[in-house]
Image: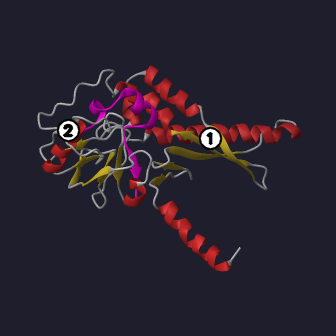
Amino acid sequence: MNHKLFFVLLLMVPVLVYSQYFEKTPSGGMVDWTDQIIREVGIGAPNPNLPIGAQRASAIEAAKRVALRNLLERVQGMNITSEVTVEQYTVTSDVIYNRVEGAVKNFRVVDTRYKSDGSVEVEVEVPLSGIFGAVLSDFVPTERPPYGYEGAPSSVVYTGLIIDARGLGLRPALAPKIVDQNGMEVYGTGSVSRDYALQIGVVGYEKDLNKARGNERVTNNPLVVKATGVTGTHKTDVVIPNNEANMIRAAAANLNFLEQCKVMLILD
């Protein structure tokens, strides 16, 4: 490979990675909110009481159990709304807990690493879509009410909505809200199609505005709005100016981009 080309590609890699929004976990995993994947690791030791030929398999199974536990802990710590975490939600019902646990158990192994001491490290991942289905079903109404806005519909055809909330300390959530300066909801679970929300989530997250513009979730002509603040206990909801809020409501009167969850939030 040409050395100059290699150097250019090398410079590009950190930029591509940096533009995605992900949170690292204490156990060495991460939640990639852009690609909507939760990844965790688990380390297992061989059972010395088993025959030599069975010890490696026992270490792999032990590592999977640890990875599953780490996945559950990470999911429990997620924000659903600005006031409710998954953990707070699951303690209300065994059915809900089992639903979340079932989604997490549906992980797939993406890497297995064998250590010199005989232990095994297993890396697993779960798509956030499984968590959406387990958690959001009780937060998204079965029937979406008509979008209540009395102004004239917008003549501009928008294909999505991007809210730039960089510099405001916004935190990710499974079901955030967008509100105007009077605290009135502009977008949230009451605005969306249940099917879309359970499949792709209420919003998408990104760190780079240009990459968000090119994301298939909102292309080809998204409306871009600068947020003025964040709100809620967990700082997951964004505040936008009233003028832009009314613009979104007017556009939603004759377009379905909100219903189809074609919304992205840009954060640090």
Outermost residue to the bottom: 4
Disc on res. 50: none
Residue 28 located left or right of residue 173: right
Residue position marked by numbered label 1 in the rendering:
66
In three-dimensional space, the C-alpha distance between marks 1 and 2, rounded to whole angstroms, equals 41 Å
Outermost residue to the front: 155
For this rendering, which residue is in front, 177 or 83? 177
The quarter in which the N terminus is drawn is bottom right
The region drawn magenta spans 186-208
For this rendering, which residue is in front, 67 or 244? 244
Above or below: residue 200 compared with residue 265: above
Q: Secondary structure at mark 2?
A: strand
Q: Is residue 206 magenta?
A: yes
Residue lying at 47% horizontally and 53% vertically, measured from the top left: 22
Residue lying at 39% horizontally and 33% vertically, measured from the top left: 197
Residue 138 located left or right of residue 64: left
Q: Position of residue 72 (x, y in %)?
A: 52, 37
Residue position marked by numbered label 2 in the rendering:
185
